[in-house]
């Protein structure tokens, strides 16, 4: 079966890999996804630390060479052809050297950012927030979630992500670490920063109002963006990651706050 005949409700097509460059040198990889904006345009979302190339807590460059990215290259489905992928480059800097991307109005302590997609972009867009989701799918501690991204930049099916299963590890209605994040228990890896995170039920689902629905699944709810695990070194990283809540992502894309490298407290 060709990809053009696949029933494209899969979130695999919403999650895209990006590679970061500095003066033509590759300095890392990450994951991104799209959301729709008012007026029919789109934004490409990932983490602040991905587009800035800096640690959001210290402001220091994340790459060992001290390089920070000036270009992001994404791999997308060619418009009208799911079987063919193309690279598309986003400049991360304006002519005056200032960031060409946007961030949350709270600053880098909300480790999320986005770029605007050109209206004439030659690739298809599959938004992560969709009209066919189940927005009232109940999400409580212990519920399975999927982090859909590219660990270590790896894909074992051409152009498609790897689904890493996890579970909600905090009370979703409350803040965690004094931030609008949900904690998830999952064995994620470098390269998955910026991944969309979804809750999914297959044969039946419990809704927020206590109702139960059966059959006609899957039931899917987009809950936010993954942005890394707690811990510093590979050996002492906890298997607990941060997911920025969708409400904060929606706030961000409404404000168009210019990106910067200033650390907010």
Image (tube, rainbow, N blue to C red):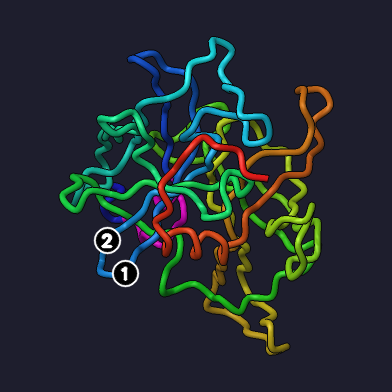
Residue 136: percent from left, percent from top: 60, 79
- Judging by the rendered image, the residue that carries numbered circle 1 is 38
| Residue 256 relative to residue 223: left or right | left
Q: Is residue 10 magenta?
A: yes
Magenta span of residues: 6-15
Write down the quadrant of residue 139 in the picture: bottom right
Do the numbered discs 2 and 1 sit on residues whose CB atoms are within 8 Å?
yes
Q: Which residue is mark 2?
A: 41
Vertical position of residue 128 compared to residue 12: above or below = below
Residue 232 location, x and y as percent?
77, 27
Q: Kindly identify the residue that appears in the image at 81 percent across and 22 percent down.
A: 235
**Which label number is shown at residue 12?**
none
* Towards the viewer: 242 or 6: 242
Q: Nearer the viewer, residue 53 or 25?
A: 53
Residue at the spot 71% in from the left edge and 59% down from the top edge: 144
Q: To which quarter of the image does residue 22 belong? A: top left
Q: Quadrant of the C terminus?
A: top right
């Amino acid at each position: 079966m060709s990809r053009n005949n696949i029933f494209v409700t899969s979130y695999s097509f919403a999650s895209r890999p990006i590679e970061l460059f500095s003066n033509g040198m590759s300095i890392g990889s990450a994951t991104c996804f799209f959301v729709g904006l008012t007026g029919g345009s789109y934004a490409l979302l990932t983490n602040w630390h991905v587009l800035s190339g800096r640690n959001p807590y210290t402001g220091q460059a994340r790459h060992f060479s001290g390089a920070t990215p000036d270009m992001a290259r994404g791999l997308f489905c060619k418009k009208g052809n799911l079987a063919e992928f193309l690279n598309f480059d986003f400049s991360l800097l304006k002519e005056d050297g200032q960031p060409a991307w946007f961030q949350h109005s709270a600053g880098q302590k909300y480790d999320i950012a986005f770029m605007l997609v050109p209206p004439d972009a030659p690739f298809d867009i599959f938004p992560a927030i969709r009209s066919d989701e189940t927005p009232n799918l109940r999400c409580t501690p212990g519920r399975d979630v999927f982090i859909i991204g590219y660990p270590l930049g790896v894909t074992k099916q051409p152009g498609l992500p790897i689904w890493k299963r996890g579970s909600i590890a905090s009370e979703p209605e409350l803040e965690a670490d004094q931030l609008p994040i949900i904690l998830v228990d999952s064995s994620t890896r470098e390269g998955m920063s910026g991944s969309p995170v979804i809750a999914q039920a297959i044969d039946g689902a419990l809704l927020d109002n206590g109702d139960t629905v059966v059959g006609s699944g899957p039931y899917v709810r987009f809950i936010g963006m993954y942005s890394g695990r707690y811990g510093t070194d590979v050996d002492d990283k906890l298997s607990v990651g941060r997911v920025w809540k969708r409400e904060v992502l929606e706030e961000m894309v409404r404000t168009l706050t210019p990106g910067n490298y200033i650390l907010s407290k």
